[in-house]
Amino acid sequence: MKNLISNKNIYFFVFGAIGGLGSAIMYGVVGLDHTITHKSGS
C-alpha cells in the first residue's frame, strides 16, 4: 500500500512538472508568435 501511494505521488509530481514545463513553453511560443506578428504588422 505504501509503495502504491509513493508511486502515485511520484507520478503526480512528474506529471505536474511536465505540465508546468509544457505551459511555460506554450506561453513562450505564444509570446514569441505575438511579438513576431506585432513586428510584422508594424
Image: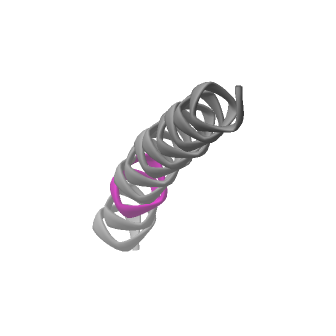
Instruction: Decide which of 7, 13 is in the foreground and name it.
Output: 13
Q: Based on the displayed image, in which of its 4 quarters is residue 6 positioned? A: bottom left
Instruction: Decide which of 7, 29 is in the foreground and name it.
Output: 29
x and y percentages locating residue 20 in the rendered image = 52, 42
x and y percentages locating residue 35 in the rendered image = 60, 27
Q: Horizontally, is 34 left or right of 33 in the view?
A: right
The structure residue drawn at horizontal position 54% and vertical position 43%, both measured from the top left corner, is 33
The structure residue drawn at horizontal position 28% and vertical position 65%, both measured from the top left corner, is 3
Residue 8 in the image: above or below residue 36: below
Determine the main secondary structure of the stretch shown in magenta: helix
Instruction: Decide which of 41, 26 is in the foreground and name it.
Output: 41
The structure residue drawn at horizontal position 70% and vertical position 37%, both measured from the top left corner, is 41
x and y percentages locating residue 42 in the rendered image = 71, 25
Q: What stretch is highlighted in magenta?
A: 9-13
The structure residue drawn at horizontal position 69% and vertical position 31%, both measured from the top left corner, is 38
x and y percentages locating residue 9 in the rendered image = 45, 54
Residue 14 in the image: above or below residue 33: below
Residue 33 in the image: above or below residue 1: above
Q: Horizontally, is 30 left or right of 2 in the view?
A: right
